[in-house]
């Protein structure tokens, strides 16, 4: 095979991997647009509706680490195909769901399949493209697909929910999954497994997932049960115990899910902390702004899809073009901080959106800033988290950074949705109208999300190791002190 053929094959393989990731991203944004319809059809309360999103995110986050390790041990291509099959089958179950519990159970399985696909897609990309300049371009394509999938998802979600029903937002994954499976078998190269065989850390995956589920359950039901109640405090204590048990397992396991020594690399640790805080803000924005548009401004599902479109198109354009160029020219830190601060301003604008808001004045400016911020910051966060990791640990590192996003998103969404519900109840009890009270709760959630994004920007600015691009496009540490 000539060098040109090899290069062509690698880029075709990248497109196949991104198509699989597209299905995962498509599912996430489609669901947000359809949330009010699902709530009305299956009888979810506003707080229990969180589980439609979090059932997916918790298993996604909890098993990303195991998915990356499985790929390292048994072959990335093989496990990627298994993840595609699992996700596609679970999508069918979601589409056929006619009860709350069936939908939540199917979303849980779907999260496991999505975890395997996402962890292994990113690690396969890192293994396919080892040169810094090529890797930056490949990550730009990956980021474009993630943001572009969001654009397709919000529109498709609006169209399918308005013209057919919310069930079709899941059924649309079926043809994509079939195409990805057969294209992977044809185009994706099968690499020899190089990781040392060892015992799988299933106990670690189960304890960290149980910790997250218990914490989210306690937070989501905290308003109803009482924050000082034995039930809430007991669940949070058990969640903390499970997490401590997870740390203990990782410290003693010969082949841990997360080698704790990985976090001695400062950029890995800081990038994951930033990822948790940023995801808390971004997932809450997607969830709560969809409710604001439909329940406060009375938008139809199609109008919600169109309202999200500017932000998603900007994320797509910046992830593909400007973000990669900014990283190559300015390094990792400055684009990361600038993007997070833009996103925080966008959330602050949503925190002042009135009950009788106007799209051009009250919705579009925040959407544009959030699209700019997310598009610029996405690539630097991933590159920072992967920058100090050996290629043989790429599956593990990609699992860790994606887990941070999912953990932050799930916990942040639970906390901010509960905060919104509590503020709404208190405002209505004080005599405000139902719409004004609902909007007051959303304002509190948006402002809290903005604070989280600002905290992420400050941590990145103060603690992330400075990266400087050299002459050939590689990004290098500026000094040994990590200043």
Image (cartoon, rainbow, N blue to C red):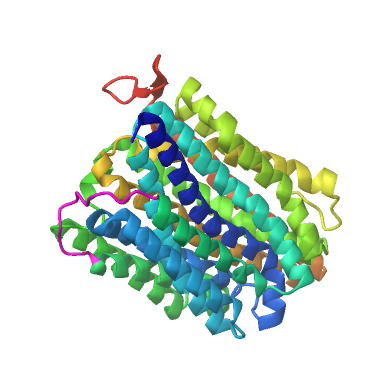
- Quadrant showing the N terminus: top left
User: Is residue 248 in sight in this rendering?
Assistant: yes
Residue 123 relative to residue 257: left or right: right
- Quadrant showing the C terminus: top left
Q: Residue at x 55, y 48 (%)?
A: 146
Q: Nearer the viewer, residue 75 or 359?
A: 75
User: Is residue 215 in sight in this rendering?
Assistant: no
Residue that sits furthest to the top in the current view: 471
Residue 193 belongs to the span the image colors magenta: yes
> Residue 297's quadrant in the figure?
bottom right
Q: Residue at x 47, y 43 (%)?
A: 12
Residue that sits furthest to the front in the current view: 1
- The relative height of residue 392 versus residue 388 in the rendered view (above or below) is below
Q: Nearer the viewer, residue 188 or 147?
A: 188
> Residue 465's quadrant in the figure?
top left
Residue 62 belongs to the span the image colors magenta: no
Q: What stretch is highlighted in magenta?
A: 188-201
Q: Which of 177 and 442 is in front in this view?
A: 177
- The relative height of residue 425 versus residue 458 in the rendered view (above or below) is below
Residue 397 relative to residue 21: left or right: left
Residue 351 horizontal/vertical position (percent): 71, 50
Give the tally of numbered discs. Answer: 0
Residue 446 horizontal/vertical position (percent): 65, 52
- The relative height of residue 266 versus residue 289 in the rendered view (above or below) is above
Residue 191 relative to residue 15: left or right: left
- The relative height of residue 73 versus residue 453 in the rendered view (above or below) is below
Residue 342 horizontal/vertical position (percent): 62, 36
Q: Main secondary structure of the magenta part?
A: loop
Q: Which residue is drawn at 66% across and 53% down?
A: 152
Residue 468 horizontal/vertical position (percent): 40, 20
């Amino acid at each position: 095979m000539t060098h040109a053929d090899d290069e062509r094959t690698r880029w075709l393989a990248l497109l196949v991997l991104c198509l699989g990731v597209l299905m995962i991203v498509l599912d996430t944004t489609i669901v947000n647009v359809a949330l009010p319809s699902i709530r009305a059809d299956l009888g979810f309360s506003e707080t229990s509706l969180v589980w439609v999103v979090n059932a997916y995110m918790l298993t996604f986050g909890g098993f990303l680490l195991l998915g990356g390790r499985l790929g390292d041990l048994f072959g990335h291509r093989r496990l990627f195909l298994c993840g595609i099959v699992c996700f596609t089958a679970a999508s069918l179950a979601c589409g056929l769901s006619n009860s709350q519990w069936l939908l939540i159970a199917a979303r849980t399985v779907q999260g496991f399949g999505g975890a395997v696909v996402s962890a292994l897609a990113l690690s396969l990309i890192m293994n396919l493209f080892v040169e810094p300049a090529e890797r930056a371009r490949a990550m730009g394509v990956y980021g474009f697909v993630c943001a572009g999938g969001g654009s397709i998802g919000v529109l498709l979600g609006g169209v399918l929910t308005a013209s057919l029903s919310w069930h079709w937002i899941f059924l649309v994954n079926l043809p994509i999954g079939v195409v990805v499976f057969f294209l992977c078998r044809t185009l994706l190269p099968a690499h020899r497994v190089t990781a040392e065989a060892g015992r799988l850390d299933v106990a670690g995956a189960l304890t960290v997932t149980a910790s997250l589920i218990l914490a989210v359950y306690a937070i989501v039901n905290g308003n109803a049960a009482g924050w000082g109640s034995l039930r809430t405090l007991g669940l949070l204590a058990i969640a903390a115990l499970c997490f401590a048990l997870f740390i203990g397992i990782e410290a003693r396991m010969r082949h841990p899910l997360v080698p704790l020594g990985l976090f001695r690399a400062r950029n890995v640790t800081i990038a994951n902390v930033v990822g948790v805080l940023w995801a808390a803000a971004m997932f809450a924005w997607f969830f709560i702004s969809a409710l604001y548009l439909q329940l406060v401004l009375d938008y139809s599902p199609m109008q919600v899809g169109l309202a999200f479109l500017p932000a998603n198109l900007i994320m797509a354009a910046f992830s593909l073009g400007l973000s990669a160029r900014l990283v190559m020219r300015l390094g990792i830190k400055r684009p990361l901080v600038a993007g997070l601060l833009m996103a925080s301003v966008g959330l602050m604008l949503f925190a002042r959106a009135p009950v009788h808001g106007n799209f051009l004045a009250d919705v579009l400016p925040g959407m544009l800033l959030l699209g700019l911020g997310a598009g610029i910051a996405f690539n630097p966060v991933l590159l920072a988290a992967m920058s100090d990791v050996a290629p043989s640990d790429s599956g593990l590192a990609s699992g860790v950074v994606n887990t941070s996003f999912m953990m932050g998103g799930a916990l942040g969404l639970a906390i901010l949705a509960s905060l919104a519900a509590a503020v709404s109840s208190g405002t209505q009890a004080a005599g405000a109208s139902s719409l004004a009270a609902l909007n007051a709760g959303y304002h509190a959630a948006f402002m809290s999300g903005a604070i989280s994004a600002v905290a992420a920007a400050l941590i990145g600015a103060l603690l992330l190791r400075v990266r400087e691009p050299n002459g050939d496009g590689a990004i290098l540490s500026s000094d040994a002190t990590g200043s």
